[in-house]
Image: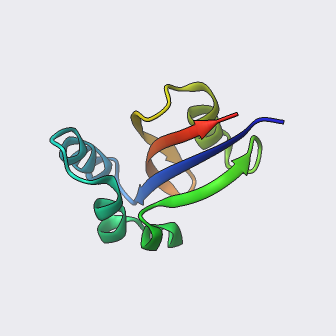
Amino acid sequence: MAVAAAVHILVKTEKQATDLLAQLQKGKDFGTLAKRYSLCPSGKKGGDLGEFRRGQMVKAFDDVVFQKEILKVHGPVKTRFGYHLIKTLYRR
């Protein structure tokens, strides 16, 4: 079964996610922004979700982690939790 590791930032609005994405594209540190802005408990760890299997996350999140380019920030991705910026660290 496929496993992956990812970091993410979870915020309430698409605008906030877009603003954070712009900061990341200008070279801001992902972990620093996650600690400051993420609503997810993983924010305390720089957004680190650790390793997980396909199907453990909501579908929209899973689709990004298991299908999109690795080490690139994707989003905003809308789920029932809010808007995510997601970076897959590896998948195997």
Q: Residue at x 61, y 57 (%)?
A: 50
Q: Is residue 39 above or below residue 31?
A: below
- Locate residue 7, reporting x and y percent: 49, 52
Number of disc labels: 0
Q: Residue at x 84, y 36 (%)?
A: 1
Task: Specify whether 30 is left or right of 9.
Answer: left
- Locate residue 15, reporting x and y percent: 26, 48
Task: Specify whether 80 is left or right of 24.
Answer: right
Image quadrant where residue 74 sits: top left
- Locate residue 65, reporting x and y percent: 59, 37
Coloring scheme used: rainbow
For the C terminus, the quadrant is top right
Task: Specify whether 27 is left or right of 58.
Answer: left
Q: Is residue 45 above or below residue 59?
A: below
Image quadrant where residue 32 sits: bottom left
Q: Residue at x 65, y 39 (%)?
A: 62
Residue lying furthest left: 26
Task: Specify whether 28 is left or right of 30.
Answer: left
- Locate residue 59, reporting x and y percent: 67, 40
Q: Residue at x 49, y 44 (%)?
A: 78
